[in-house]
Amino acid sequence: KSSILNFIYDCNKNYTGKIIFEGNEDDSIISVRRKKLSYVFQDFKLFPKLTLWENIKIKNNLTNFKTDDHILMIIDKLGLSEKKDQLVETLSLGQKQRVSIIRSLCQPFDFLLLDEPFSHLDESNIEILTDIINQELENQNAGFIMTTLNNEYLFKYDKILNL
């Protein structure tokens, strides 16, 4: 399941065939990826020697999509305010997962790719994040593709594919 998301995001080219997104084939998908896709990686892809705040801001500085106040509000909702200046390498897996999700929301997108986004989270954080993600999807009029072992999350969706 992760491989499919990696193919779509163009970070794994180990497949045959073509991926076409809005008329763009594989070779030109990099520009599409920057503007149309955001990805929550299963392994987070965070910078361990940067702080929680720096990991989020590195994305937002490229896009200027969210205000600092909005990002801080999300950090606070997820109980991470006291960890803001802590190095990511010192965070728990659940904290890293929340940082990864916040970072993915700091850019415009038509599709949000979520690879096992809640595997290290408790029910409370899953509920909070589901609300935040649903609101962001609605605000951006975007869709999502999610891999998960548990399909009981509170997302609005049109179709479930069991692989």
Image: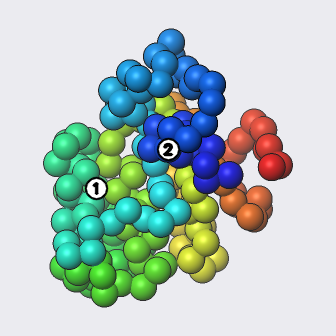
Amino acid type, mark 2: Asn
Residue 137 visible in the snapshot: no
Camera-side mark, 1 or 2:
2
The image quarter in which residue 148 lies: bottom right
The image quarter in which residue 68 lies: bottom left
Badge 1 is on which residue? 70
161 displayed left or right of 119: right
Q: Please report the residue visible at 75 percent of the width from the left and 65 percent of the height from the top.
A: 150
Q: Quick check: marks 1 and 2 in contact, CB under 8 Å?
A: no
| Residue furthest right in the image | 162
Residue 101 visible in the snapshot: yes
Q: Please report the residue visible at 44 percent of the width from the left and 44 percent of the height from the top.
A: 11
At mark 2, the secondary structure is: loop
Badge 2 is on which residue? 12
Q: Please report the residue visible at 33 percent of the width from the left and 26 percent of the height from the top.
A: 31
Q: Position of residue 163 (x, y in %)?
A: 80, 49
At mark 1, the secondary structure is: helix
User: Dot 1: within a 10 Å radius of its alpha carbon, few (fewer than 14), some, or many (20 or more) residues?
Assistant: few
Amino acid type, mark 1: His
Eyeballing the image, is 9 above or below 132? above
Eyeballing the image, is 75 above or below 85? above
Q: Label 1 to label 2, Cα distance in Å?
A: 33 Å
Snapshot colouring: rainbow
| Residue furthest top in the image | 23
